[in-house]
Image (spheres, helix red, strand yellow):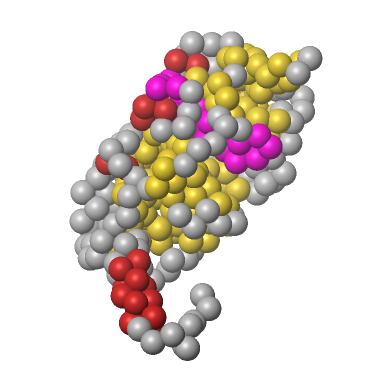
């Protein structure tokens, strides 16, 4: 801002304006580990964007979406796996697999890709775990690791295909892990918290990442085995999503439209309204959060609500060309 030193009275006016804008900042919380909140929050501003609804070959709910080396894929109810295709200029999410890795129709709730994005892993109900080679189209069934029948809510995968580290988060508050590509007999598990459902898990390095549960807890690991709570005692909302970009760069989203960011020293919260936020993804200072009622929020330093052509709940988003969001009743949006 250019300062008008030659005009008496302007200095005081600018000081007053600066104070006013400063009072509307996002509220820092911390430095802390497992601590409570102080400060204020900021509601998202409104904005416009061009989101388009595209054709989908299923009415099943879609729960997650990923970008692979062969394009974008989504997973959902009854074990469906879909691929985004473009034919004669028309976008269509086509069904590739129906029934999941075991063919028994168990819902698939989470997915992730290996480092080269050539292997797509997914997890779901009753211990469903599968690996899909996006080049060959071959599925390998890893279901029931360590004989569990627990529901898996999310999965994180690091490393190359055929030698990946695999982490699965369950309804019973367990994190299953295999450092040998999910091979039978290589799985172990740990309970990071009190046994509350772990809804989301994400890694930023081979054995370093974060997980969140429905008890308002965020957990961190740097060895893939030992987990430590780093917050958030007084969040007072369920957490549904985590984006782990570094040890000091973590985004968490949950109920009541709340988004939280950890910078290694303190938590900052932003209030985006009344939507339950099911996914958050931020890369290089730009990102999105999605949730109930077809709500999408864009981040570029400030969170802003965007218009969408649907009222269906949105469960997941992936950035790219295009950026895609998926949700209830076979809903798929892109921009």
Q: Per the image, is 311 magenta?
A: yes
Q: Is residue 207 above or below residue 84?
A: below
In this picture, residue 1 sits left or right of residue 8: right
Could you tell me residue 269's position as x and y percent?
33, 57
Could you tell me residue 320's position as x and y percent?
65, 40
Name the image quarter holding the C terminus.
top right
Q: Is residue 11 above or below residue 238?
A: below
In this picture, residue 83 sits left or right of residue 169: right
Q: Is residue 235 above or below residue 109?
A: below
Could you tell me residue 203's position as x and y percent?
52, 51
Could you tell me which residue is drawn at 32 percent across and 62 percent down? Answer: 24
Front-lying residue, 81 or 178: 81
In this picture, residue 153 sits left or right of residue 58: left
Q: Is residue 307 visible?
A: yes
Q: Is residue 78 visible?
A: no
Could you tell me residue 20's position as x and y percent?
30, 68
The residue furthest front is 7
- Say how many tags the image has: 0
Could you tell me which residue is drawn at 56 percent across and 57 percent down? Answer: 285
Quadrant in the picture for residue 315: top left
Magenta-colored span? 310-328
In this picture, residue 171 sits left or right of residue 327: left
Could you tell me which residue is drawn at 37 percent across and 38 percent down? Answer: 277
């Amino acid at each position: 801002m250019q300062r008008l030193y030659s005009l008496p009275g302007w200095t005081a006016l600018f000081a007053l304006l600066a104070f006013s804008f400063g009072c509307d900042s996002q509220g820092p919380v911390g430095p802390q580990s497992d601590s409570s909140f102080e400060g204020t929050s900021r509601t998202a501003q409104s904005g416009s964007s061009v989101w388009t609804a595209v054709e989908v070959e299923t009415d099943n709910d879609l729960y997650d979406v990923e970008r692979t080396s062969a394009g974008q894929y989504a997973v959902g109810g009854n074990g469906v796996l879909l691929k985004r295709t473009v034919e004669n200029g028309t976008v269509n999410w086509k069904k590739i697999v129906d029934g999941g890795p075991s063919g028994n129709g168990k819902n698939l709730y989470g997915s992730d890709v290996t480092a080269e994005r050539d292997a797509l892993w997914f997890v779901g109900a009753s211990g469903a775990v599968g690996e899909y080679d996006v080049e060959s189209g071959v599925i390998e069934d890893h279901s029931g690791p360590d004989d569990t029948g627990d529901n898996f809510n999310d999965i994180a995968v690091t490393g190359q295909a055929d030698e990946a580290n695999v982490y699965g988060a369950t309804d019973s508050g367990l994190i299953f892990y295999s450092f040998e590509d999910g091979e039978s007999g290589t799985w172990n598990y740990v309970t990071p918290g009190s046994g509350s459902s772990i809804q989301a898990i994400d890694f930023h390095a081979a054995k370093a990442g974060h997980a969140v549960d429905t008890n308002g807890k965020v957990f961190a690991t740097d060895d893939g085995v030992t987990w430590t709570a780093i917050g958030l005692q007084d969040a007072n909302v369920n957490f549904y999503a985590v984006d782990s970009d570094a040890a000091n760069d973590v985004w968490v989203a949950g109920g009541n439209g709340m988004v939280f960011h950890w910078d290694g020293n303190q938590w900052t919260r932003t209030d985006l309204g009344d939507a339950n936020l099911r996914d958050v993804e931020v890369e290089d200072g730009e990102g999105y959060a999605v949730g109930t009622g077809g709500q999408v929020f864009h981040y570029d330093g400030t969170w802003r609500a965007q218009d969408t052509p649907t009222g269906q709940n949105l469960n997941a988003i992936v950035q790219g060309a295009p950026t895609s969001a998926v949700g209830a009743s076979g809903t798929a949006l892109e921009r």
